[in-house]
Amino acid sequence: MGYDDLKVVEAHSFLESVLDGHQRAPGVAEALAVAEVLSAMERSCESAAWEDVGPLAAQTEAAP
C-alpha cells in the first residue's frame, strides 16, 4: 500500500467513527503506549541500560 492508500483507509475509519460514535483503534490509548515506549528508548540511550516502560507521569516526576 502507498501513502495515499493508507490515508484513504484512515479517513474511512475516522468517518465511520464519527457516524456511529465508536472510536476505533488506534486511538489515544495506543498513542500513549507508543509515547511510553519512545520515552523508555530515549532513557535507555542516555543511560546505556535497559529501562522499564511505564506511565509517563511517573517518569517525569522522577526526572531531576
Image (cartoon, helix red, strand yellow):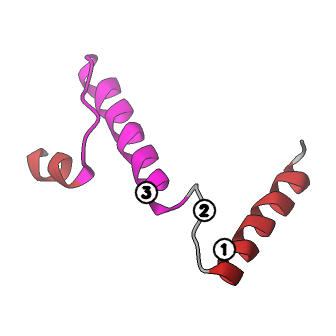
- Horizontally, residue 54 falls left or right of residue 58, namely right
Question: For the view shown, which residue lies furthest in the top direction?
Answer: 49
Which percent across, then down, holds residue 26?
58, 55
Which residue lies at the image location 45% right of the left edge and 45% below the top edge? 34
Determine the CA span between mark 3 and mark 1.
16 Å
Q: Are marks 1 and 2 in contact (CB under 8 Å)?
A: yes
Is residue 64 visible to the viewer in this orientation of the structure?
A: no
Foreground of the two, 28 or 61? 28
Q: Which residue is mark 3?
A: 29
Determine the CA span between mark 1 and mark 2.
7 Å
Figure disc tally: 3
Task: Tell me which segment is drawn in magenta.
Answer: 27-56
- Horizontally, residue 26 falls left or right of residue 52, namely right
Q: Which residue is mark 1?
A: 17
SS assignment at label 1: helix
Q: Which residue is mark 2?
A: 24
